[in-house]
Image (cartoon, helix red, strand yellow):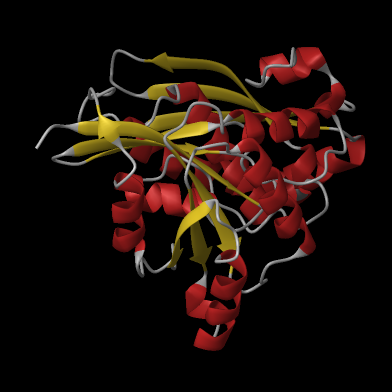
Amino acid sequence: MAFRSGFISIIGSPNVGKSTLVNLLVGQKISIVSDRAQTTRNRISGVVTRKDYQMILLDTPGVTGAKNRLGDYMLKTAFDALDEVDAILLMIDASQGVREKDEQLIGELTKRAGNTPIVAAINKTDLVSLGTIDEITERLSKESAIKAIVPISAATGRNTEKLEAALAGYLVEGPKYYPDDMVTDQPMWAICSEMIRETALKLIRDEIPHGIGIGIDKIKLRDDGIHDVFATIYVERESHKGIVIGKGGRMLKRIGTEARGEIEWLFGTKVNLQLYVKVRPDWRNSPAALREFGFDPNF
């Protein structure tokens, strides 16, 4: 059988489990996971290589209303990822049902998809009854553009092999775009930045995480094999700076300790992580700041 390959764009409302699914299929963490909406800010490519095929998964930001320039960028990134792919994976949160924003997304998808097949994954089925899954399936089956519907749980792995097989059915004869051991096209500094942001999102249960940006100032490998990583956590208000640092610097130390463990796993070496906190007012509307943090402000 000829080798097949192709690109699959994953789209859905915020917090439906797109990044969890990508990490599961790829086999390691490349996309950060949080219960906060809009965790994924850029398009992230996850590479799934099997014996007979290679599938490139495009994990996109959750589709929601934009409130600033960063939000505009995220929305454009999500829909731009629909262009020239072999299939689109629409993800629905079973625990939330098909909400108004999901209906709007389905309508937008059917207009934009053209002849590109859509596969729907009903995620988080481990949290709901079979009746709920049947209701969502019945609603999605009314859309002629949706060619397959697969109930899954990305958290437990339930039915994800069936979903992968459905997606692989739309791959075409083609080259192996990436080496076997490559799981993402993201540079090390970008994943490192996201690991720090994921840790901050997890530890700071407040209103500020959407206003957190991570700048990687320098990554340097010492002669003794230790990586020095210097990073700055940017916040939009002076009061937020105090929350990130915490009393006696304890919160910043916790963020650094936990993020360092993740980065050491990524690099496969010891890491000396140095974190700083700076205030950068309204950075999410600043083209210069967006460029610095790895986003393209010229969209």
Residue at image coords 56%, 36%:
194
Q: Is residue 250 visible?
A: no
Towards the viewer: 61 or 244: 61
Front residue of 248/150: it is 150
Q: Position of residue 155 (x, y in %)?
A: 44, 65
What is the x, y in percent for residue 179?
A: 22, 24
At horizontal 24% and vertical 25% (from top left) the residue drawn is: 174
Question: Residue 42's x, y, as percent?
Answer: 60, 31
Note whether 277 is above or below 201 in the view shown: above
Residue drawn at x 73%, y 20% as measured from the top left: 290
Q: Observer-nearest residue: 178 or 99?
A: 99
Q: Quadrant of the C terminus?
A: top right
Relative to 90, say whether 234 is above or below.
Answer: above
Q: In the rendered view, would you say 90 is above or below 182?
A: below
Q: Which residue is drawn at 53% across and 45% down?
A: 32
Residue 295 visible somewhere in the drawing: yes
Image coords of residue 202 (percent x, y): 62, 54
Q: Is residue 20 left or right of residue 201?
A: left
Looking at the rendered image, the quarter that the N terminus falls into is top left
